[in-house]
Amino acid sequence: MAEGGASTLFLSLGSLKWKKKPEDEESYRAPLILLPVKLERKSALSGVVMTHHEDDPRFNLTLIELLRQDFERSIRSRKGRSRLTRAAST
C-alpha cells in the first residue's frame, strides 16, 4: 500500500494567544514554531522515544499570514532577531 500524504509530526514551541476584538470572550491560540519530530519504538513492549526528524524547524506560516491579513502585522527578521511590526499599507 503506497502512502501519498505528508506524515510529519510536529512539536510546537511557544504559542500566541489572541482575541479578534479586545471585548470578545472567545480567545484563540496557535503555535509559533513547529519542530519536526518522529516517534520511535524498538518493540511493542518498549517505551516510545521522540527524536528529531530530518526536516528543518519552521515558523507557523499560517499564523504569520493571519497576523498580516487580520491585524496588519508582519514578522520580519533583523540581524537574526524577529520583530513584530505594523504591516505596510497597500
Image (cartoon, rainbow, N blue to C red):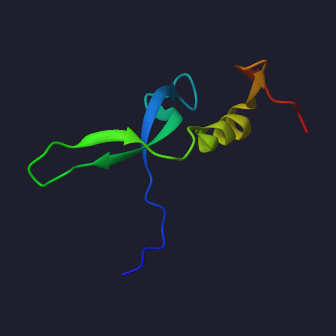
Does residue 27 appear left or right of residue 40 in this picture?
right
* Image location (x, y in percent) of residue 2: 42, 79
* Image location (x, y in percent) of residue 85: 76, 21
Residue at horizontal 48%, vertical 38%?
35
* Image location (x, y in percent) of residue 87: 81, 29
Residue at horizontal 48%, vertical 68%?
5
View extreme (bottom): residue: 1
Count of numbered badges drawn on the protein: 0
Specify whether residue 27 is in view: no
Front-most of residues 31 and 39: 39
Does residue 39 appear left or right of residue 16 in this picture?
left
Occupied quadrant, residue 11: top left
Q: Is residue 53 above or below residue 75?
A: below
Does residue 79 appear left or right of residue 1 in this picture?
right
Residue at horizontal 58%, vertical 39%?
60
Does residue 72 appear left or right of residue 46 in this picture?
right
Specify whether residue 87 is in view: yes
Residue at horizontal 52%, vertical 23%?
23
View extreme (left): residue: 45
* Image location (x, y in percent) of residue 57: 56, 38
View extreme (front): residue: 42
Q: Quadrant of the N terminus?
A: bottom left
Q: Quadrant of the C terminus?
A: top right
